[in-house]
Amino acid sequence: IYPPVVNDRRLVDLVRSAAADVLLTDDHLQPDYQTLAGEDMSFFLQAVPGCYFFLGSANSDLGLDYPHHHPRFNFDEAVLPVGVELFVRCVERFCHA
């Protein structure tokens, strides 16, 4: 049985702040999102405060919009630099907090 994923509020705020800088707008940020999906991250978050977030990678123009676990699932690799930039900014904020 997987425990629930419980994000640390301080780190949620940190990720939101970094994402707003990377995306240059918060139009792409979703409000608090809840899902019943099980995730290994819940075990990590029991030991260390953290924040689990989604980096949108679907692109319907390219036919890359199938859900996870679908046999035709794939993602738009153009989002990878955005994810790297987001992680770098999160680390910078965390280290300077």
Image (tube, rainbow, N blue to C red):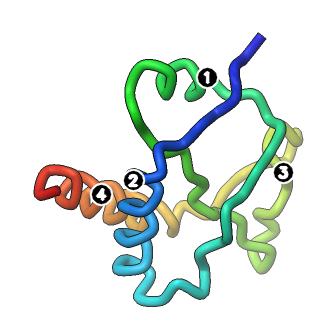
Q: Amino acid at mark 1?
A: Asp
Q: Earlier in the sequence, mark 3 or mark 1?
A: 1
**In the image, residue 75 lies at what x, y percent?**
66, 57
**In the image, residue 92 lies at what x, y percent?**
17, 58
Q: Which residue is mark 2?
A: 10
Q: Which mark is residue 90?
A: 4
Mark 4 lies on a secondary structure that is helix
Cα–Cα span, label 2 and label 3? 30 Å
Q: Amino acid at mark 3?
A: Pro
Label 2, residues with CA under 10 Å away: few <14, some 14-19, many ≥20: few
Q: Earlier in the sequence, mark 2 or mark 3?
A: 2
Label 4, residues with CA under 10 Å away: few <14, some 14-19, many ≥20: some
Left or right relative to 60: residue 12: left
Residue at screen point 47% across, 44% down: 8
Label 1, residues with CA under 10 Å away: few <14, some 14-19, many ≥20: few
Cα–Cα span, label 3 and label 1? 19 Å
**In the image, residue 97 lies at what x, y percent?**
16, 56
Judge by depth and name the residue closer to the eye, 71 or 11.
11
Q: Earlier in the sequence, mark 1 or mark 2?
A: 2
Nearest to viewer (mark 3 / mark 1): 1
Mark 2 lies on a secondary structure that is helix
Q: Which mark is residue 40?
A: 1
Q: Which mark is residue 67?
A: 3
